[in-house]
Image (cartoon, coloured by chain):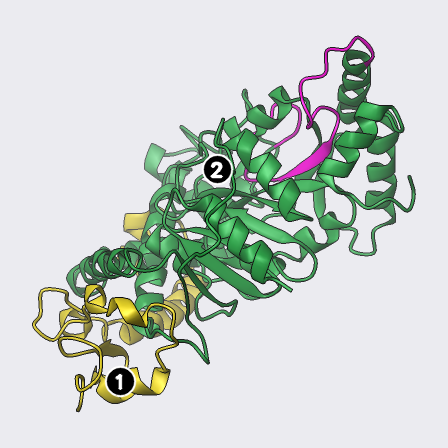
Chain colours: A yellow, B green
Amino acid sequence: MAEVSHAACIALDEVRLAEFAREIGAELTALTELDQDCLCDLNSENALELEDFREDKVWECLPSEALLSAALCRDGDCFLVPEVLGEGSGSA
Amino acid sequence: MRNCTFSVSELAEKLWRGEITSVELTEECIRRIKASPFGDEFVFLDIDGAMQAASASDERRARGCALGALDGIPFAAEDRFCTVRMPTENNCGMLRGYMPPYDADAVRYLLDAGAVLLGKLHTNGFLSANCAPANDKNCLVGANRSIPFALIAETGGASWFCGGHQGIVICPARDMISRQGLVSCAPSFDRVGIFVGSFDDGKYIMDRLLEKTEFTAVPDSVKTVWWGEDGSVDLPISEQTRSAYHILSAVEAASEMGLYDGIRFGTCAEEDGTARGRMAETRGRFFSHKEQKLILFGTALLMGEHREKCYFSALKLRETFQRQLKGLFTRYGVLACPVSERIVYLPAFADLSAVSHHGMLWMAPRGREAMLLSCAERCGI
């Protein structure tokens, strides 16, 4: 954290530095889970293709359950839906 | 006057008919501000300046030279907007006592229309970059009882919680309203908006701020997609997108706060020694604990492995997410969802225009502001 405070040009005492090192260190550790594999990639063949929403579905409520059951869940956070949404599609 | 509600359109009508004067209206606003149970929503009040402006407005109206419907209507601005007559401190020690040499563009548009600037509202300052909790902008709720409308700066989403039963928050996409003179917190997320009491007021003021945009009638059928607990669409909103916002806003905020070195900008600790030593001492003394943490966090995200794993990944995620939403909006006009801490950062993250009212957040790409207001007005019950 001393290196970071030097780069940020902030003069801090040892106590404050140690406190920040603990707090920021924990946040940075949690954030390292965010890496390329977790991103929803439009270029991937399994990416969510919103443009494939069927026109006749516009005014209907697509139930969340249908989407969830059709989704290939990567890491439990990003929802990837194979190909086209609609009847007969998206079966797991 | 004491029991009148503050609707811009109704007040403008009364001023035009001569039922009230701008001086009386401004005095009533000042009385309500002083009697407010919140008490601390205003950080600066310019009573003398406001009364002078109100008198000038009445004189213009008496001569038949009123500047428009906003002429003589009082308003307030968050203390992130530069104003010539009042300090702009942005709730930051580094800007204590700073008197800008110019008004922010958004403030100037309203002053040129004859509106009366009463004072500056409390702001979270540079900490606006954080994903804000629900009670962070209670000052707007208090101010809504005292003034007809307020000019706000939106970054992290705190304003959307105020669009409940107390009022309506309207915020077009980034740079639709000039940010010149807005103390920058996170440049790619900062936006200018307004807090008003009715949709008519919102349309009128947005016409003025967006300069000649006419909010004409929209088609009866608007394709609206609902996203929420009973919603029809699941978007890849997750802790990943929230984390990406957190990363990018922190990096940008740290960069913006890097300008305040006590030499070019900001106040200065009088220390002998090297220039760098003076800068470090100044920033260590005048930034708050939370601001220092935000600076260090944003700086750390650009160093070592975090630069690739966090910062560049967040940039890519944001771009991907924006492209996905673009596809959604080719099919739907407006996206609607309940306001919650989970999604309030979305309009800034995805660069969408948004309206908040009755606990709902309505979002659409730039250019659909009239559609947004129409949907929110028709569906907000």
**Callout 2 environment at 10 Å: few (<14), some (14 to 19), or many (20+)?**
many
Horizontal side, residue B206 vs residue B367: left or right = right
Q: How many marks?
A: 2
Q: Position of residue B354 (x, y in %)?
A: 47, 52
Indicate whether A44 appears above or below B118: below
Kind of residue indicated by mark 2: Val
Residue B25 appears in which quarter of the rendering?
A: top right
Chain bearing mark 1: A
**If the image is split into quadrants, where does the C terminus of chain B sit?**
bottom right
> What residue is pinned by disc 2?
B183
Which residue sits furthest top?
B63
Indicate whether B15 appears above or below B66: below
Residue A57 appears in which quarter of the rendering?
A: bottom left
Horizontal side, residue B136 vs residue B219: left or right = right
Horizontal side, residue B67 vs residue B323: left or right = right
Residue B274 visible in the snapshot: no
Q: Position of residue B143 (x, y in %)?
A: 73, 48
Q: What is the span of residues highlighted in magenta in the rendered image?
A: B62-87
Horizontal side, residue B63 vs residue B278: left or right = right
> What residue is pinned by disc 1?
A76
Say which of B75 and B282 sits in front. B75
Distance Cα–Cα, label 1 vs label 2: 38 Å
Residue at image point 68% right, 53% down? B139
Dot 1: what SS? loop
